[in-house]
Amino acid sequence: MNRKHVFLLNPAAGQGQAIGMREQIENISQRLSLDTEIYETKEELDAQVFTSQLIKNNDVDTKIRLYACGGDGTANEILNAIIGHDNMELAVIPMGTGNDFVRNFGDVELFRNLEYQMTADTVKTDVIRYTWKRQGFSCSRYCINMFNIGFDCNVVEMAGKLKKKPLISGSMAYLAGVAAMLVKMKGADLKVEFEDGKVFDGKMLLIAIANGCFCGGGVKGVPKALTDDGFMDISLIRKCSRRRFIQLFPKYAKGEHLNAKGADKLIIYRKAKTLKITANGEPFTFSTDGELTKAKEIEFEIVPGAVDFVVPQQIESNK
Ligand SMILES: Nc1ncnc2c1ncn2[C@@H]1O[C@H](COP(=O)(O)OP(=O)(O)OP(=O)(O)O)[C@@H](O)[C@H]1O
């Protein structure tokens, strides 16, 4: 089978570092005699549109490795084009702000090594399908890393606004977003229906529905999530005082909050294959792999082993 390597560079991700990769990609491709194409995304959803077109024009004997050179948002767009198609592999070169999905596979720096990426094997990775109504029509899309609603989602929203200001980097914007949201402590008011019939109905600080553990640039908010166990992990933190959450936050960031004192009363943590969330009132904002949407009701379902994901390993040097 033939093999092609297609790099999608997102100039809007992180600090725009993806654009600087062009020369390095060309040099390595030449040295390893690889069939390579480079494409610079032009706008939101362009990575998905370009990939769909590529799949349409592909012959059945060519395997394509697609490299999301950006953050989780770029990877999400490629995922939504390749899902259900044979001979497609997803690689992520972390050049975004948070780069949270690759953190599930160890050293982020390994993912920045192009040669490792171009020669690595893939692993089967689960994804989460979600269905919601847009202008009366039912839509389904896929998430590779995490959904956030409430506190974490509000931080993403605030950080997105701050990032546009001059001299504020992505990580600074995220920290400022956390600070702003600690002042507001705005959560969400939702009905959460678990697959075993249990229901949580009311105000909460946040809920995360996760395939991977990390959000917000390394915050290990859903610490038991595994990308290949056939389950999504659901972490719900009940409404609590600012003081209580500030106490908990250092543990939350490190993924040590589930064993903290009083955590059993504050946190509902479950593994599940399906889940339904409905707004008690106005539609709520949710973040999918860091991108924001509004919905009144969403249904989630795990799709086990849906993607061949490239996991680079250190290559032993001969020197
Ligand atoms: N040329 C472009 N101009 C503006 N936006 C673009 C362009 N190309 C892609 N995008 C959009 O940029 C957005 C951000 O990309 P991405 O999520 O990969 O980076 P990030 O937000 O810095 O990283 P992370 O999600 O890991 O924090 C995506 O919504 C994508 O659709």
Image (cartoon, helix red, strand yellow):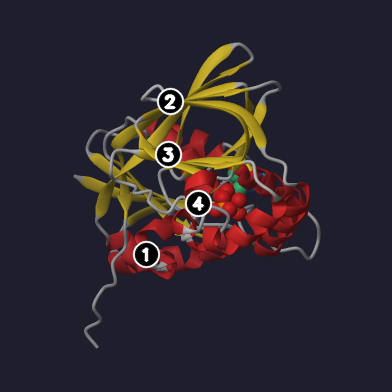
Return the disc, 3 or 4, that comes first in the chain's sequence: 3
In three-dimensional space, the C-alpha distance between marks 2 and 3, rounded to whole angstroms, equals 32 Å
Element at badge 1? loop
**How busy is the neighbourhood of tag 4: few (under 14 within 10 Å), some, or many (20 plus)?**
few
Q: Amino acid at mark 4?
A: Ala
Of labels 1 and 2, earlier in sequence is: 1
Q: Is residue 10 visible?
A: no
In primary-sequence order, the first of circles 2 and 3 is: 3
Residue 159, percent from left and from top: 71, 52
Residue 79 — which label? 3
196 on left or right of 17 = left
**Mark 1 or mark 3: whose residue is earlier in sequence:** 3
Residue 198 numbered mark, or none: 2
Element type at mark 3: helix
Identify the image quadrant of the N terminus: top left
Which disc is residue 106 wearing? Answer: 1
Figure quadrant of residue 53: top left
Picture residue at 56% right of the left edge, 65% below the top: 20
Q: Is residue 81 above or below residue 12?
A: above
Q: Is residue 91 visible?
A: yes
Q: Nearer the viewer, residue 242 or 146?
A: 242
Q: Furthest-right residue in view?
A: 166
Taking 115 as reference, is 122 above or below it? above
Pair 1/2: label in front:
2
